[in-house]
Structures are given as C-alpha cells and as structure tokens.
Image (tube, rainbow, N blue to C red):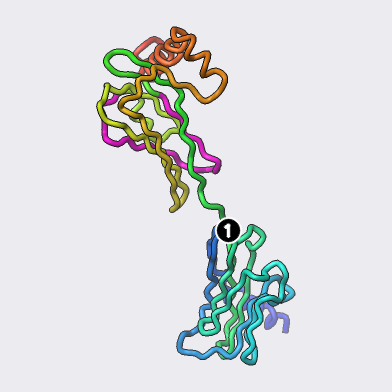
Amino acid sequence: MSLLILLVLFLHVVGARPPDEVVGYLGETVTLPSGADPSLTLTKIEWSIFSNTTWIATRRNGLTVIDRVARFQGRLQLNITSGDLTICDLRKEDEMKYTVKLEPQPKTKEIRLIVNRRLQKPTIEPLFRAAGGGGFWLGLQCSSQDEAVDFSWKIEPPTETSGRQAERKSKEIFMFLKNTETDVEFTCTTSRTKENVSSTFTLKSDDTTICEARKSPSRNRCILGLPICLLIGFVIPVVLYMCRENICAPC
C-alpha cells in the first residue's frame, strides 16, 4: 500500500508542470492567455489567485463578474470567447501566480505574472570641453536610474576623433575632436535583456564655449578661472589617457 502511495506521489510530481511566465510593465496592460482550445465553446471561466482559490474574474451561466476583488476593480477585462484575462494599469503587487479553470476544457492552467519597470531614459551631462591643437577635448558622462544596465555610445555623423574610442561601452567618454562645421550628436543607450532606451546630447557647430561644466555654482568659477579650467579640462585628461595607453611612466 505504501509503495502504491509513493508511486502516485511520484507520478504527480513528475507530471506537474511549472507555471507559464508572462512579463508585464508598471502602468501598462498585460493579457494572461488561458490556453483554451479555440475549437471549444467555453461554458465556464474561472480566474483565481492564492492557494485558497480567491476568484477575481468568472464567467458562469452566461454571467460575467470581474469586480470580485477590490484591488482589481476597474482594471480587469475577460474575453468570454478565448478565456484570456487582461489586467490594466499594472502594479507591482499584481506580480503573483494566477490560475484559470475552463469548461469543457478539463485542464487547469497556472501563469506567473512578472511585473517590471520600463527602462528610464539615461541622462547625459558634459564633464568638460577644452580647446587646443586644432580641435578640443570633450568629456561626457551618461547615468541611469536603473540597475544592471549596459552602456553604449554612438556618434553621428562619424567625426575625426582620437582618445578613448575603445571605451564606447563605458558610462563616460573622453575624446579629442577636430573642429567641425556640422552639429555632432552623441547618443547614449542603456540596455537590459531585450529592452533599450537612448538619450542624445547635441554639440552645436557654432558653440564657441571653451569650458562647459555641470550646472552648479562651480560653473561661474569655471568661467572666471579660465586657466584653472583649462588645466582640469585639458591637461589632466591627456595625462590620464597617456597613462592608460602606457605612453608615459606608471602613475
């Protein structure tokens, strides 16, 4: 008898399928598929949450009810043909396991909803700009509110540059640009899995500013103290670059 019970439990565990996963985004709309056979005419639809079978949307005896639970009121739509459940205005607390039972389709389906936040646009800030040698040194920094994202840069149109060109995948770029008669766009892109978002910084061709610092009280000091600004914005980046390229002695 004990062997029979163990065998039944083993078959139950082996036959159990993990819930399907559906990814939605905060504030947006997501549809949970019921998996119903399209050839069937559904006579009963029951969507529930939690282990105690708390119904949130049902279709029974021709009557549809989608306001059973206060937290979902005004945010659910039930497709009585396919059995799919749509949740609007997604919230983080909507992230959980959902169960759907259909008739005459006998199988019960479980779906785990994952609620993420869309990537936020990155912010580009000028670190410095210093003229010299028929062009100028430029430093830009890209920052993101999101964690675990990758950074990449794109320059349009392609310009004659030198410097840390090999580090286009870092948060910051420092480079020397030849004087140009056209606007130059620097696009920073942050990406995670299959999602990415970008921001663009435009360097105007008629911008004759020698030094640009972040918008802070230090901006005025930078304009007034031009020699110090040039030292910070030109000499130090050049020395750092030469050290990184092993051109000078170890720092």
Q: Where does label 1 land, which residue?
A: 27
Residue at coordinates 51% horizontally, 78% vertically from top-left? 35
Q: Is residue 246 magenta?
A: no
Could you say which is closer to the camera, residue 173 or residue 179? 179
**Residue extent of the magenta highlight:** 139-162
Could you say which is closer to the camera, residue 161 or residue 242? 161
Could you say which is closer to the camera, residue 127 or residue 13? 127
Which quadrant of the view contains residue 245?
Answer: top left
Q: Mark 1 belongs to which amino acid?
A: Gly
Q: Position of residue 90 (x, y in %)?
A: 60, 61
Which quadrant of the view contains residue 98?
Answer: bottom right
Q: Position of residue 238 (x, y in %)?
A: 38, 15
Image side of residue 12 versus residue 37, left or right: right
User: In the picture shown, does residue 151 fall above or below 56?
Assistant: above
Residue 136 in sight here: yes
Image side of residue 113 versus residue 228, left or right: right
Q: Position of residue 43 (x, y in %)?
A: 58, 91
Image side of residue 127 versus residue 77, left or right: left
